Amino acid sequence: MRKIEELKFDNTYRKLPEEFYHLVKPTPLKNPHLVCFNSDAGSLIDLDPNEAKKPDFIEYFSGNKLIPGSDPLAMYYTGHQFGVYNPDIGDGRAILLGEVRNSVDEKWDIHLKGSGRTRYSRIFDGRAVLRSTIREYLCSEAIHALGIPTTRALCIIGSDEKVERETTETGAMMLRMAETHVRFGSFEAFHYTDRPHYVKLLTDYVIEQNFPALFKEENKYYMLLEEAVNRTAKLIAKWQSVGFTHGVMNTDNMSISGITIDYGPYGFMEEYEPEYTPNHSDHFGRYSFQNQPAIALWNLNKLAQALGSIIPRERAQDALEGFKNIYSQCFVELMSKKLGFKTARAEDVGLIKRLLDIMVTEKVDYTIFFRKLSNLISDNADLNHDAVCMFEDKSGIEDWAASYKRRLRAENSDDIERKRGMNLVNPKYILRNYLAENAIRKAVNEADYSEINLLHKILQDPFSEQSEFEEYAGPSPDWGRNLAISCSS
Ligand code: AMP
Ligand code: MG
């Protein structure tokens, strides 16, 4: 375990040409203080958790002091936002402090969000508010615990600095970590400014740093695109399986390494509703729950176009065509696991579809239903079961449950074993919006950060029964059902 000053930096992005970034230091926050620290994320860079107790920790992660060896820069990228190309973005309020190499030779970007204006800030203030950093901190760690690739969150630093949003709030910084922050939009930036040599340079860089297995391949550019298709398809299938809706799937928020990045107005679907759109400014539901697979493919098309100078169009098309199959296969596998099947059978796709169709009309809580379903007894005709009772109109679900039981018996499913397996993939605890809101209100109104830490702890272990926290597993109370999530952050 290391002290902050002993972290080993290997700042590879900094060695790229200066058109790739803006060298800029964080702008310090006024009266910074520690809000929360995640020792799990710290261990990824060998950071001694006791470091978070030192006053200097706050100085380093509020932009007041530079970590020795760091070499801060804002990354350049552009992107398609809500379908329209925006040539004018980039890290407008985040700064890559540097890349840290750990004792097992993994490299982690350490990226400070809310760190002040950069060349890419346009008319905005370069800041993040405490509310939005808490949302990102909690959700990225919850998504990680669900086994879904994501950026990680190390800490939040709060401050007295006033930041104007719909109301006056206070500024905060969050340190997040990832194997890379290169996005689809990083490639688009050079493609649309007619600099194919930089598209190639960036691609070579990403392959060398993040896809070393492709380095010596003759078709490495094609294989990178294929890998991006593969990872993105699997990522989205995982989101769908737990009801996660990202909310702003612009190409600048799509990671080349296939991880969840940039948590804004996201949401976990509660009642099953394919049109669920957590971002209230997304009036046409472009980024609704059900559209995520199609949008991911649309975004991959934009990535392929940006790589057009190094991958011929027809070849790129081959890679893109893989998306549908990879996505469907992964989704069906995940849903089959949620249903507790041991083997794959031809009828499963129909069974999954029938269940989801009934859930839509009945507005049943997606997470709670699957968790309860694990208790169903497969070899009796009793349909008066917890999970079935969640439906007001029983006709559809009773029919479905009878087919489900037949399906389980056909593979000699053992109820106890099935329940164990189902509870490993159907979370009991998800980050319902009202839970995040409770933690935010306590933090913002009372400077009480205990609820952030408690929620983080519960969500770190989403598949276990934590009997003392039963109330965190229920549906949202009425006040928390339709909370508007501000997309200003
Ligand atoms: P996002 O929707 O958070 O992914 O942001 C899209 C773009 O807007 C990125 O280039 C951000 O850096 C930039 N941006 C968002 N909020 C701010 C802000 N408060 N100050 C400067 N840039 C911002
Ligand atoms: Mg973004």
Image: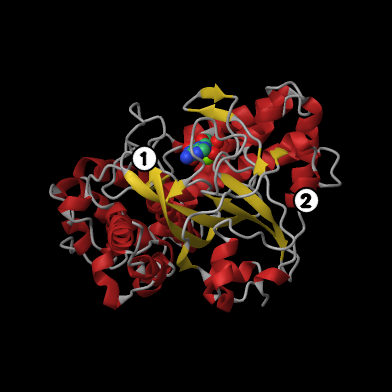
Colour setting: secondary structure
Residue extending furthest toward the front: 30
Q: Residues within 10 Å of mark 1 (few under 14, many from 20)?
A: few
Residue 47: horizontal and vertical position, in percent? 63, 72
Label 1 SS = loop
Residue 411 can be seen, yes or no: yes
Residue extending furthest toward the left: 392
Q: Nearer the viewer, mark 2 or mark 1?
A: 1
95 up-or-down from 310: above or below:
below
Q: How many marks?
A: 2
Residue 346 can be seen, yes or no: no
Q: Please indicate whether residue 303 sits to the left or right of residue 383 in the image.
A: right
Nearest the camera: 92 or 195? 92
- Give the residue at x 51% y 56%: 174
Residue 215: horizontal and vertical position, in percent? 83, 47
- Give the residue at x 42% y 45%: 349
Q: Where does label 1 land, which residue?
A: 165
Q: Where does label 2 land, which residue?
A: 12
Q: Residues within 10 Å of mark 2 (few under 14, many from 20)?
A: few
Identity of the amino acid at label 2?
Answer: Thr
379 up-or-down from 74: above or below:
below
Q: Mark 2 or mark 1: which comes first in sequence?
A: 2
Q: Where does the N terminus fall, quadrant-wise?
A: bottom right
Q: Are marks 2 and 1 in contact (CB under 8 Å)?
A: no
410 up-or-down from 121: above or below:
below
- Give the residue at x 26% y 71%: 470
88 up-or-down from 431: above or below:
above
Label 2 SS = loop
Quarter of the figure with residue 489: top left
Nearest the camera: 100 or 349? 100
Residue 64: horizontal and vertical position, in percent? 58, 58
The circle on residue 122 is: none
